Amino acid sequence: MKNIIILASGSGTNAQRIAEHFENNKGVCIQAIFSNRTDAYVLQRAEKLGIPAYSFSRDDIYSNGSLLKKFEEFSPDLIVLAGFLWLIPSEIIQKWPIINIHPALLPKYGGKGMFGHHVHEAVIRNGEKESGITIHLVNEKYDDGQRLFQAKCPVFQDDVADTLAERIHRLEHEHFPKVIETFLETL
C-alpha cells in the first residue's frame, strides 16, 4: 500500500481529481489533505470525499515542527502539492519525496509569486504561442526540482488569463493523477 498526503491552498480541484483517480485503487491511499488556509474549499472537498482534512499555520510548518510531526504520524510514501503555494522546508523535503504541479512550461514562468493567474497573465503578456503544465519533484527552491512531465496547449490571440487557465486545468486534471501513479511505481 502506497500512502499519499496532499497539500493544497485553494479550491482543491486537483486534490479532488487525484482522490477520485485513486478511489478504487486498493494499492494507493490518500491519507489526508492539508491546507495552510482554514477557509480553503479543498478542506470541504476532503470531507465530502471522506478524507481527513487538516489546516495548519505558518508556525506549524516553519517554526514549531508540528506539521512535520503530523506527517511522521501518517508516514506517507509521497507528498503531493496540488496548488500549495508555500516553500517546503528542507527537513520535510529530506524525509519524503514531494511532487508538485506548475501551470506553465518550466523553467519559464516559475519562482516565487508565479502561480495561478499571475502565470497566465505573464504568458499572454509576453506573446507566448504555447503554455502548459510541468509536474516536477520539489527541492528547496520554488519550481526548481527535477521535471518529470510536461504537457502543452496553445495560447490564442484572444486569450485572457481565465480562458488560458481553463485549458491548463484540463491538462492538470488529465495528467497529474497519471504521473503520480507512475511515480508511485518507482518507490
Image (cartoon, helix red, strand yellow):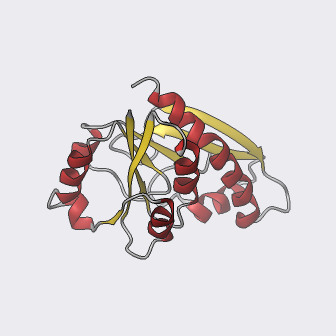
Q: Is residue 154 left or right of residue 45?
A: right
- Give the residue at the far left of this rendering: 64
User: Is residue 98 visible in this depiction of the protein?
Assistant: yes
Q: Quadrant of residue 3?
A: top left
- Residue for point 52% across, 57% down: 114
Q: Quadrant of residue 116?
A: bottom right
What percent of the width, then of the height, locates residue 51? 42, 57
Q: Is residue 72 left or right of residue 133?
A: left
In the depicted structure, whether residue 148 falls above or below residue 90: above
User: Is residue 107 visible in this depiction of the protein?
Assistant: no
In the depicted structure, whether residue 103 falls above or below residue 52: above
- Residue for point 39% across, 43% down: 4
Query: Where is the N terminus found, in terms of image quarters?
Result: top left
Q: Nearer the viewer, residue 88 or 28?
A: 28
- Residue for point 14% across, 61% down: 64
What percent of the width, then of the height, locates residue 99? 44, 41
Q: Nearer the viewer, residue 158 or 18?
A: 18
